[in-house]
Amino acid sequence: MTKAELNKFREILETKQAELSGLLRHKEDIAIEKSPDALDEVQRAAERELAIRTLDRESNLLRNVSAALRRINDGGFGTCLHCEEEISPKRLVAVPWSPYCIQCQEQADQHQDESSDAFDDVLVNAA
């Protein structure tokens, strides 16, 4: 990968990092507010759950973006962390913070789905 391409990816990632950092500062949507109306309580709980999920997703994305910037600085950007093969340029354009090539990402997603299903089974059996 050329130095110009790396600088372009660095710029994209730094912009995304700044955007996510700004979004994560707004955590007031998670505040627990009591209401005498049960329907209002349910609505606020649903909104709070959505805000928590969004915050979690954005926090994970920020960690991935920061890790990609570290890989640029360390010289490992564009190389799959699992198989150490080159990540497709098309994939990097679409998801510049991606640590894995398509094949390894699919394996990681499948493993995550299986782990999630096993955790769901534990919760169901515990109830």
Image: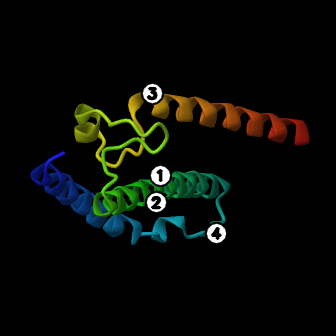
The answer to the question of whether label 2 and label 1 lie on touching residues, with beta carbons closer than 8 A, is: yes
Amino acid on which disc 3 is placed = Gln
The answer to whether residue 95 is visible is yes
Specify whether residue 127 is in view: no
Whichever of labels 4 and 1 marks the residue nearer the N terminus, that label is 4
Q: Which residue is mark 4?
A: 34
Residue 26: image quadrant is bottom left
Q: CA distance from mark 4 to mark 1?
A: 26 Å
Q: Earlier in the sequence, mark 4 or mark 2?
A: 4
CA neighbours of label 3 inside 10 A, class few (<14), some (14 to 19), many (20+): few
The type of residue carrying mark 4 is: Lys
- For label 3, the residue is 103
Q: Position of residue 33 (x, y in %)?
A: 59, 69
Q: Please name the residue that numbered disc 1 is placed on.
A: 57
Residue labelled with disc 2: 59
Residue nearer the viewer, 36 or 52: 52
Secondary structure under tag 1 reads helix
Specify which label sits upstream in the sequence, 3 or 1: 1
* In contact (CB < 8 Å): disc 3 and disc 1: no
Between the residue at mark 3 and the residue at mark 1, the CA separation in whole angstroms equals 22 Å
Badge 4 vs badge 2, beta-carbon distance below 8 Å: no
Where is residue 48? Give x, y as percent.
55, 58
Cα–Cα gap, marks 3 and 4: 47 Å
| Colour scheme of the rendered structure | rainbow
